[in-house]
Every structure is written in C-alpha cells, then in structure tokens.
Image (cartoon, grey):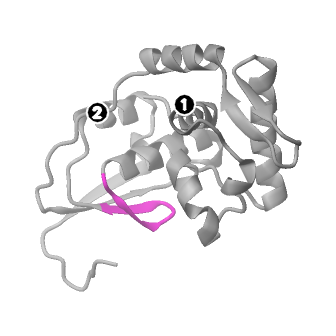
C-alpha cells in the first residue's frame, strides 16, 4: 500500500482543477496556503519543507520533470506560470490510478479510544510517512508527531502491511477503557 506520491498528487490536482499556481501552495504553515496544500494533501503526507525557497525548488523540479516527460505544460512567465495537464498526462494519471491498490475499507467506529505510538527509525522515513498517512486515513488525530488517537480499529489490511513492512516492532497500540483526564482538542 504505497503512499500517494507528490507527483500523483500534482497530476490529480491538475486533472480536477485544470491548472496550478505554485505560489498558491507556498509557504507551508500560513493560512492563505492551507486550503491549496490540503487539496493536494501536502501537509497530511509528510511533505513539509524548511523554507518557502526549499518548497518552491522541490515543486518546481517535479513540475519541470513532468514537463520534460510531456505530462504537463505551462502558460505565462516562469514566475506566474499556470501549469496544466496534457493529454499524455491524463493517460499517465489513469494508468497510475489503475495500478494502485484500493484503499482499505474502514471498520466502523466502536467508541473505544486507541492510542497508537511509534518510533520508526529515520532510515525508514518513507515507511514512517506511509504509517502517518494511513493513521490519518483512518481518522486518527495527531497528538504528537508519533502519537495518534482514534476511535476505530485499524483495518486488517493495514495491520498486515505493517507486519510486511517490518514496522510492528516500532509500533504500540493501546486501548483506553475510560477517558479519564483526556479531553478532545
């Protein structure tokens, strides 16, 4: 169950919204860019950058690569470019979607509060980002970068994938019978 790539997120956004302005996504952490970043899922999937310059360089390099591959084109000056998806880009996106496994079916919420904590090593950053994405997909809320709170059991597909990726030794899941002093944020 691979994490949705930034390339795919950009192509999906272009497919649905017809064009993209890079400046609409920058800088991260500011209210005026929150909606655009949320649409692409940039903040949910670990795509955070130290600075506006680093973020712009990364997004620009991905869009430049996609342009070389003939998947996107742009209009306007490089500073105010409006990026668009080409026919070849639409076909490529459809292939990506067809090849990707479906997201797991979410079990219903059962009211049992669960805390998921993990300490996945830095060397396995991609797996750690995948885990965060799956927890967010399962409606778990972030309490800390590696502590999540939710009221639904994790789907069996995710549990099996955690085992297959060798992450089970880094993850602890605890159920809470009574809420006590925990308050919903």
Q: Any mark on residue 104, and which?
A: 2
- Taking the spot 88% from the left edge, 42% from the top edge, the residue there is 78
Nearer to us in this view, 142 or 91: 91
Q: State which tag comes first along the sequence, 1 or 2.
A: 1
Q: Any mark on residue 48, and which?
A: none
What secondary structure is the magenta-colored segment mainly?
strand
- Taking the spot 68% from the left edge, 31% from the top edge, the residue there is 84
| Residue 95 magenta | no
| Residue 143 magenta | yes
- Numbered disc 2: secondary structure: loop
Q: Residue furthest bottom?
A: 181
Image quarter (top left, top right, bottom left or bottom right) of the N terminus:
top left
- Seen in the picture, residue 46 relative to 19 is either above or below; the reply is below
- Numbered disc 1: secondary structure: helix
- For disc 2, the neighbor class at 10 Å (few under 14, some 14 to 19, many from 20) is some
Nearer to us in this view, 123 or 131: 131
**Residue 7 location, x and y as percent?**
64, 32
The span shown in magenta is: 139-149
Judge from the rendering whether residue 184 lies leftward or rightward of residue 21; answer left or right: left
Q: Any mark on residue 15, and which?
A: 1
**Residue 119 location, x and y as percent?**
50, 54
């Amino acid at each position: 169950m691979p994490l949705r790539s930034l390339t795919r997120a950009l192509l999906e956004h272009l497919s649905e919204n017809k064009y993209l302005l890079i400046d609409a996504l920058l800088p991260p952490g500011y209210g005026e860019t929150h909606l655009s970043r949320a649409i692409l899922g940039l903040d949910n999937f670990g795509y955070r950058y130290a600075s506006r310059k680093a973020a712009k360089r990364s997004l620009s390099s991905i869009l430049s690569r996609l342009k070389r591959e003939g998947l996107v084109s742009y209009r306007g000056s490089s500073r105010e470019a409006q990026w668009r998806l080409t026919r070849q880009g639409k076909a490529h996106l459809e292939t990506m979607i067809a090849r990707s496994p479906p997201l797991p079916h979410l079990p219903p919420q059962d009211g049992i509060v669960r805390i998921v904590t993990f300490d996945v090593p830095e060397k396995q950053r991609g797996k750690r980002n995948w885990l965060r994405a799956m927890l967010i997909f399962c409606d778990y809320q972030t309490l800390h970068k590696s502590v999540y709170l939710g009221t639904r059991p994790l789907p069996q597909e995710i549990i099996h994938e955690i085992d297959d990726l060798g992450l089970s030794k880094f993850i602890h899941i605890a159920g809470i019978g009574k809420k006590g002093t925990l308050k919903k944020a």
